[in-house]
Image (cartoon, rainbow, N blue to C red):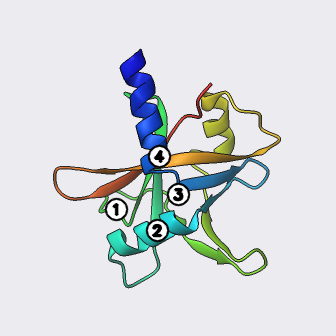
Amino acid sequence: MMLKRFLLWWRSLRYHRYYVIADCSDNSITFSHKLYKHIELSSHCEDAAKVFVFGIPAWGTYGFTVNPALDRETQLADIQYNEKYKTIGFESLCPSVNRIFCEYGLPCDLKMKLTVTVHRLGDGKVFYNIERPRP
């Protein structure tokens, strides 16, 4: 238990600038500035960036990856710039932000800031894990 708390504390120090703002009212996910810069550097895309959101059952969390190579057709969200608020993010419809909030046990009437951790797979691909908030 103590080791788990230490690891959570360490991750929060290491990744405190990588977060998203999730909003149930319009199913939007907004990137922090540092997270967007990391995505920009690691995605290597010349065209429009697409996001694939997925569940991670083993961890009980959700994650996303940018410009994945998928074998079959699936729903991808466009990364968009919001001129009014000067923010960058995407609209997550499958799974919806409401579903993510329900699974995480969060109230649906608030915007929530959720920590994101960066993971690199064996083949060098990067995915981003949207961490559950601490109780």
**What amino acid is at disc 3?**
Arg
Mark 1 or mark 3: which comes first in sequence? 3
* Numbered mark located on residue 13 in the image: 4
The residue located at (55%, 70%) in the rendering is 79
Neighbour tally class for label 4: few under 14, some 14-19, many 20 plus, Cα within 10 Å: few
From the top left corner, tell me how far across and down residue 41 is, in percent: 36, 74
Mark 1, residue position = 68
Residue identifier under label 3: 17
Categorize mark 1 by other alpha carbons within 10 Å: few (<14), some (14-19), many (20+). Answer: some
Residue drawn at the location 70% of the way across and 32% of the way down: 106
Mark 2 falls on what kind of element? strand
Q: CA distance from mark 1 to mark 4?
A: 29 Å
Assign the C terminus to one quadrant of the image: top right
Which mark sits nearer the N-terminus, 1 or 2? Answer: 2
- Depth check: 72 or 23 in front? 23
Residue 100: which numbered mark, if any? none
Q: Earlier in the sequence, mark 2 or mark 3?
A: 3
Mark 2 vs mark 4: give the one in front.
4
